[in-house]
Image: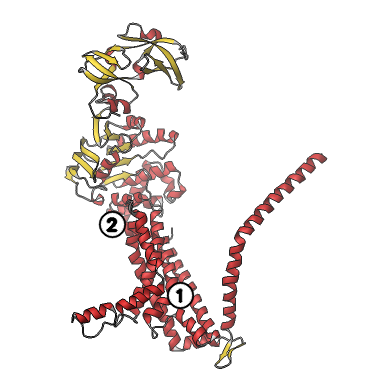
Amino acid sequence: MTASATAGTLQSLAAREMRGGRLSTAGFLIGPATIFVTVGLLFPILFLFRYSLNDFKPGVLMIDAFTIKQYVLFFTDPYFTAAFYRTLRVAVVVTAICVVLAFPLAYVIARTQSRWKHLLIMLVVLPLFVGNAVRAAGWMTLFGNKGFLNVSLQWLGLIDEPLRIMFTETAVIVGILAVNLPYVVLTLQSVIEGIDRAVEEAAFSLGAGPMTMFRRVLLPLALPGFVAGGIFCFILTMNAYATPVLLGGPQFVMMGPLVYIQFAIKSNWPLGSAVAFILMAATLVLTAAANLVVQRRYRR
Amino acid sequence: MARLELHHLSKHFGPTVAVSDVTLDIADGEFVVLLGPSGCGKTTTLRMIAGFVAPTAGRVRLGGREVTTLPPWKRNAGMVFQSYALFPHLSVAENVAFGLEMRKIAPAEIKPRVTEALRMVRLEGFAERLPRQLSGGQQQRVALARALAIRPDVLLLDEPLSNLDAKLRETVRVEIRELQRQLGITTVMVTHDQEEALIMADRLVVMSEGEVRQVGSQRDLYERPADRFVAGVVGRSNILPGKVVEPGRFETQGGIRIACAGGQAGPAVIALRPERLALGPAAQGLTNRLHGTVEFVSYLGANIDVHVRVSAADRVVVSQPNRADGRLPSEGDKVEVGWPAEAGVVFAEEAGRPQA
C-alpha cells in the first residue's frame, strides 16, 4: 500500500518534471522572438501612439499633452488628406494590377513540368536582389527628362519636348508594381501548386471551357493565394518609401515619406506619430475588411 | 453511349514515343481495359480519348463523330480520375451538378438528375457533404456519379481503384462492372492490375512500350498469348529459354528436351502455366515428365506453389490446388513434374528486341 503510493507519487513527479521540462524548452525556443517583437515593435508603437496625442509648438517642439489635435489637423488639412487618398489610390491600383499580372506567371510556374522550373523561380526572385533605391535610380537614368529614352527620341526627331515619365503617379505605380510583383507571384504559385491538376481536367471533361473552369474552379480554389498575395502587395504599397520618393518627386507625397518628413525635416514628432498611426490603422482596417468581404463572397 | 474508334493513334513527346499506332474499335456498351505496366502508354491513350493530349498522328471517332481536334469540353466523355479530382470547394450535389450546369440544363431538371446519379452509387444521404468529409471509397463513388450524370458517350476510368484498400477494391470493381452493364455505357478503363482487368473487362488490350501487344478476351490472352510479354501479364508463366530444335521439339538452356506444340527452329522461349503442371503421381502418363528436386514451397492458402529444380539451369513453379487430402511436398523431396505437350507455348526470340 505504502509502497504503491510512493511509486504513484514518484510517477506523477516524474511526469510533472517531464512536462515542466518540455514547457521550459518551449519557452526557451519562443522566448527570443517574443522579446524581439515586444522590444522592437510593440513598445515603439505604444510610444508612437502616446506621442501622437502630444501637442507641438514650433521652436518648443513636443509638449506633453493629451489631445487629438494632430489627428484633427491631419484630416482637415488638404495637404495631408491628399497624401492619404493618393496613397490609398496607388495601393488599390497597384494591388489590382499586381494580382492580375501575377496570376498567369504564377500559374505557368506552378504547372510547368520543365526541368528549368527552379530557374524560372530564380528569375522571378532575381529583381529582389536589386534594392528599391538602386532600381529607382536606374529608372531615373532611363526615363528622366534627360534620360536615355527621351534623349534618343529627341535625337531621332520623334518628339520635340521630353516625355514626362518621371515624377508622375504612373511612374510610381509602375515602379512599385515592379517591386511587389515577385512577392505576389511566389505567393500565388505556392497556392496553385497545392491544387490538383486533375481538378481542372475534371472541369474540362464535364464541359467547362477554360474561362468557366477558371471562374468556377481555379479562382475559388486559388482564392487564399489571391488574398494573401493581395494583402502582401497592399501593405507593401501603403508603406512604400523609396519608390515614391525617387520616382514621384517632391510633389508626389505618399504616407510613408510623409512620416519621415514630419519626423526628420519638420521635427514634428506628434504629427509624425499621428501620420504613422493613421497609416497603420488604415492598412490594418482595409486589409481586414477586404479579407472579410472576399471570405464571405466565396465561403467554402 | 456510342461506339469509340481509334485509328492509328500515336503520341510522341519529343524523341520519346509514348503511344505508337494504336487502332481499336470499341463497340457500343463494351467495357475495354487497357492493361500494362506503368509507362506503357495506356494512360496517354486514355487522355487522347478524353482530349487532354493531342495525338501526333491518327484519329479518334466517338459515336461516329470525328473528335480528334475537339477540346475535352466538347467531347461528352465522362472521366473518373485516379485522384478522383472532386471539386473540394463544392458539395457532393454541386460536384455532380457541375457537368449538368455546363450543359445549360434547367435547374428544375438538374436536381432530379443529381439525386438519380447519387442513388446509382448509393450516396443519397450525402448530397450536402463536402468531399473532404467522405471516405476514399465514397469520394470514388461521387467521382463516378459526377461522370455518369452528364450521360456521356463514353466513360473513361483512369486507375479508378488504385487508391482504395484491397478489401474495398474487390467490391467496388464488381459494382462498377454491374453499373456499367446496367447502363450499357461504352467504357475504357486503364489499369496495371491484371486481376482487376480480368474481372471487369469484356475485352482486354495489353500494351507495352507504347504498342498494343494483343487485343482479346480473357481466355484469348490466357490460352493463346501473342508473345512472351502477354504470357507474363495475364496469369503467371514459367519462362524457360532455349531453342526449338525442330517443330515439336524444344531444348532448354539446361539441356532438357521437351515436346511442344509447333514452333519454328531457332532461339525461343517456352511458357508453361504453373497451374497446368502436374506433380508426383498426377504426372503419370503425360507427354513431358521431368525429375526434379523441390527447392521451395509457398503456402498461399487456396494454392500451394512448389518450386522444382529440373536441371542446373531450369526451375519451374508448379501451382497445386490446396486439397484437404493433399500431401504437402517439402524441400529436398524428389518429385516428378509433368505436362501435356500442348500446355507449353513457344515464342520465337526476336534478335535484338528485349522481351519483358
Describe residue B324's horizontal placement relative to residue A43 as left or right: left
Q: Horizontal and vertical percent for residue A197? A: 35, 51
Of labels 1 and 2, earlier in sequence is 2
Quarter in which the C terminus of chain A is drawn? bottom left
The residue lying at 50 percent from left, 82 percent from top is A275
Q: Is residue B109 visible?
A: no
Q: Using the numbered discs, state the Cα–Cα distance from disc 1 to disc 2 in whole angstroms.
A: 37 Å
- The percent position of residue A75, horizontal first and vertical second, equals 48, 86
Residue designated by label 1: A239
| Label 1 chain ID | A
Question: Along the horizontal axis of the image, is A86 left or right of B7?
Answer: right
The image quarter in which residue A137 lies: bottom left
Compare residues B326 and A191 and report the one nearer the observer: A191
Looking at the picture, how far across and down is residue A7, in whole percent?
Answer: 77, 42
**A127 or B3, which lies in front?**
A127
What residue lies at 22% left-to-right and 38% top-to-bottom?
A: B20
Which residue is more in the foreground, B355 or A66? B355
How many labels, in total? Answer: 2
The quarter of the displayed image where residue B261 is located: top left
Residue A264 spot, x, y in % from top left: 51, 84
The residue where tag 2 is placed is: A210
The relative height of residue A172 versus residue B230 in the rendered view (above or below) is: below
- Judge left or right: residue B324 versus residue B59: right
Q: Residue at x 54, y 93 (%)?
A: A58
| Chain of the residue on which disc 2 is drawn | A
Eyeballing the image, is B329 above or below A237? Answer: above
Mark 2: which secondary structure? helix
Quadrant for the N terminus of chain A, please: top right
Looking at numbered disc 1 in the image, what kind of residue is underneath it? Asn
